[in-house]
Image (cartoon, grey):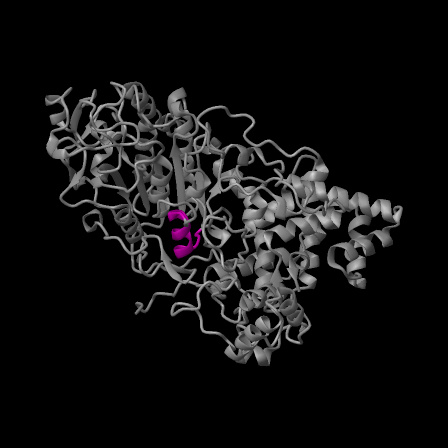
Amino acid sequence: MYPENFKKPPVDDAGASECVCSGGQPAVTRRDALVRAAHGFGALALQYLLARDGYAKARMNPLAAKPQHFPAKAKSVIFLYMVGAPSHVDTFDPKPALKKYEGQQLPPSFGKVPSQFTNGDTPLLASPWTFKKCGQSGIEVSSLFPHFADCVDDVCFVRSFYTESVVHAPAMYQVHTGRILMGYPSMGSWITYGLGSESDNLPSYVVMPQPEGTPEGGTPCWNAGFLPAVYQGTLLRSGPNPILNLKPPAGMTPGRQHATLELLQKMNDLDTPDGDTELAARISSYELAFKMQSHAPEAVDISQESESTRLMYGLDQKHTADFGMRCLLARRLVERGVRFVHLYSGGGPIIMQWDAHKDLVFNHEKMCGHTDQPIAALLRDLKQRGLLDSTLVVWGSEFGRLPMSQSGNGRDHNPHGFTMWFAGGGVKGGQLIGETDEFGLRGVGERYHMRDFHSTILRLVGLDQNQLWYLHNGRHEKLTDFGGKVIDKVVA
Amino acid sequence: MVNRIWQLRMGTGIVATPNDFGVLGERPVNQKLLDWLAVEFVERGWSVKAIDRMIVLSSAYQQVSAADPVKAGIDPDNKLYWRMNRKRLEAELVRDSVLAVSGDLNPRLGGKPIRVPIDREVYDLIFTEGERDGLWPVTPGENEQHRRSLYLLNKRTVRLPLMMAFDQPDTMTSCPARPVSIHALQALSLFNSDFMRGESNRFAARLERECEHDRGCELRRAYKLALARTPRPTEMKMGREFLAGGGNLADLCLAMMNRNEFVYVP
């Protein structure tokens, strides 16, 4: 049933946890390691490292790196998420017919197309922007993305995605977790569960929301659902205290903290019998937490980045500084072995989302202005550092926007057909896959569901959608539920 | 039902998948026991208390959790209960235990759910397109905030980091058995959060008050309260050395509440 190199994912429905609990001796016992290294902390760290590298039982550390189901180039994923839904017909899916039929109704053959706020009886709205053929591939990108336009040869656009809900939050849950209901593990949690972590001192799944606010779906977008809490997304900010509770509260000096930790570990040591992997794992978790204390601030400290790098990401300009910083941090995180970085553009107040129900021009020029240069910089920077081969970059949202207008100059939600793109690790760049009808309303021909989106991402990181499961409530739960089709043409 | 009561007490169910006795569920490890308990349950008037009492009075329940290499070789997963399963406290019990030890726990029953103070980072995750203030009106009064975790308001999009880190289910899908994961965010919440700092200060103040600054008494009392036992000589020595070396009593209290022995029922 399974290929030979595949290790069945740990399954637990019994509360006993996958991490440890049952017998089995690690290859190096705690005491052996202590004696050999002759000083407590180093030895514990050593054993943790051994465990990570697979010398000791993988059960010791739930985040131990695990083998891919089959070879694949991408080791990390950066998901650039545009909260509120950008308009595909104004960015990556040009529709000249909109110009031609501007102001007219959608032909009756398209049927009645109700959306969240409109009934489908508003006139067609031409894109206010022009499209230009870019790169050697000649892929058309709108004038909203002047910087990103130079990257298209590395990018694979899929123009015929569709989703099930016309409302933000459920559609967000679907693109993040595979279901329109909240409570299911996010894609980042699944991938961390499947592959473990390459980093010993940073969380393996990192989330960076828009500072002004969260996406409408909120934390369930990056929660672990029914998977153990260890696989949840960890929020990360720039600054000296990037992770919640990373630093001791005010008044606690580092010296005092270290002494307290040492006391704790000495006391824990007394009660931990040889070969007790569960308690040993708990001791290691404190080691890891305090390694994080120095490594996480280092990871978000960009003082060592060159001037040209800062300029490239647009850190010197007000409109790009914030998103540019998060893109730069994303690169620094994958460089340090973080498995999944979830980066949001938009959130909170409607003015800070891509949700252009009215004044499309104002909204999209602002939001594209925030993200165009930083995204181009991220792709170039990853490429010049040789990281683009091992990093999958995905751009997308919960749905697209309608070719018809709303409030005269905006667009309502469109779940029937929209564009997302892939770049980097294992992706065949410079291609267009799928299409929408002549107005950009619905995907036609080969249409791709969110399940297909997820199974393609899993394929690109070397995971088989059907082997990545967790027994919950009598079901083998999977990210793609009853299965999606891998979009083969995306894969190089 | 008897399987659930058994799971609560023993750590695992006789059928390990309590929501699923069907083809995808686990087989019972001891079907006769399950059937017998079920019949007893009915004959004792469907009394949960009666079955619960029977289980906790059984020799199976009263075993120690110590490992035995020979038995572990035969039944490594302890499916046949040759020892007691060690149990990690559930998230709510971790918080309740901390409050009980510091002397802050308000055991009052009933009433409305409470909102405890949350970190700025958590507050910022409350979605709103409008007004940013007043989205999390904290229940007034520290004593009210120190009620049992059962009374914590559980908003699906505002999860408390300490609860979340210790595998509290998200209340969105049914959770037949909680996972037990071990990871660094638990250490960060339990060692560095303002809540834990506050409670260790109170724990220390309680010890000082009750022991009138007698070090020996403080240490013994700390063990009694946090671990329900007297300290061993090595532990007394360790504690005395820590305090004599300039260590702070509140820090010692914090360490006590972070110990493996504190978060596990041995």
Q: Is residue A333 left or right of residue B122?
A: left
Q: Is residue A285 above or below residue A140?
A: below
- Label count reads 0
Asked whether A170 or B209 is in front, the reply is A170
Q: Magenta stretch: give its range.
A: A186-198
> As rendered, which of A84 and A105 lies closer to the eye?
A105
Q: Residue at x 78, y 45 (%)?
A: B204
Q: Position of residue A448 (x, y in %)?
A: 22, 45
User: Is residue A334 inside the magenta stretch?
Assistant: no
Q: Residue A383 location, x and y as percent?
A: 30, 39
- Where residue B81 sits: x, y (%)? 58, 75
| Quadrant (top left, top right, bottom left, bottom right) of the C terminus of chain B | bottom right
Residue occupying image coordinates x 66% and y 47%: B148
| Residue B247 visible in the snapshot | no
Q: Where is residue A384, by image quadrant?
A: top left
- The answer to whether residue B256 is left or right of residue B137 is right
Q: Quadrant of the N terminus of chain B?
A: bottom right
For residue A416, above or below residue B212? above
Q: Is residue A278 visible?
A: yes
Q: Main secondary structure of the magenta part?
A: helix
Verify whether residue A189 appears in magenta: yes
Report the front residue among A293 and A479: A479
Residue B161, position as x, y percentages in the image: 56, 44
The residue under the point 54% across, 33% down is B123
Using the rendered view, name the quadrant where residue A25 is placed. bottom right
